[in-house]
Amino acid sequence: MDALLLPVVDEDGAPFWEYVARGELRVQACAAQECGRLRFPPRPCCPHCQSFESEWRPMSGRGRIWSYVLPHPPLLPAYAAQAPYNAVVVELADAPQIRLVGNVVSGPDAPLDSVDPGRLRIGAPVRAVFCPAGPGVTLVRWLLER
């Protein structure tokens, strides 16, 4: 599958992408004993207690659609052939304060336009799937739960 936009991996976010490549959804958390709060996007310092200690906690991969958009026309001409497609914001079930951006697809290797836009609803349950998108790059995409 050809992904037209690929993530730019920085030092703070590299572990997230390494876990995704292994088929695991993990979120950075403060490792200070008195704090322990989750944070996304990843960053070196906890915004709550200012600790530089962190760990990566496994998530279930379940969530719900918090918001979505169907770009009309596609914002980037290279995506025109895949329209209509969706871009979603997913609120994680185990951490509602954490929201990830992605696409709802019919399967891990399915194209961006593989789900009828009429099936999308705010609050619809979804689960993460992991989609190889190029050499050394795996993306998190979402499947609608039935």
Image (cartoon, rainbow, N blue to C red):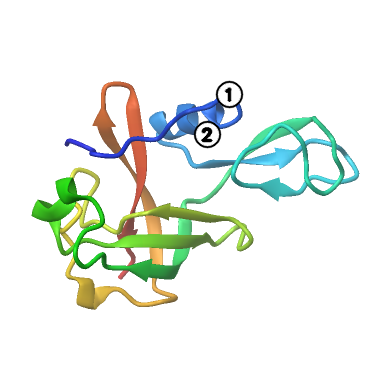
Q: Amino acid at mark 1?
A: Glu
Q: Which residue is mark 1?
A: 11
**The furthest residue to the right:** 34
Q: Residue drawn 20% across and 53% down?
A: 112
Q: Residue drawn 46% across and 31% down?
A: 17
Disc 2 on helix, strand or loop? helix
Residue 12 can be seen in this image: yes
Q: Which residue is mark 2?
A: 16
Q: Nearer the viewer, residue 43 or 74?
A: 74
Q: Position of residue 121 (x, y in %)?
A: 35, 77
Q: Position of residue 83 (x, y in %)?
A: 14, 60
Task: Say above or below: 83 vs 129.
Answer: below
Residue 110 can be seen in this image: no
Left or right of 135, for residue 13? right
Q: Quick one: label 1, few (<14), some, or many (20+) residues within 10 Å? A: few
Left or right of 142, for residue 65? right
Left or right of 137, for residue 58? right
Disc 1 on helix, strand or loop? loop
Q: Residue drawn 38% across and 62% down?
A: 88
Residue 62's disc number:
none
Q: Position of residue 26 (x, y in %)?
A: 55, 40
The quadrant where residue 64 appears: bottom left
Left or right of 4, for residue 30? right
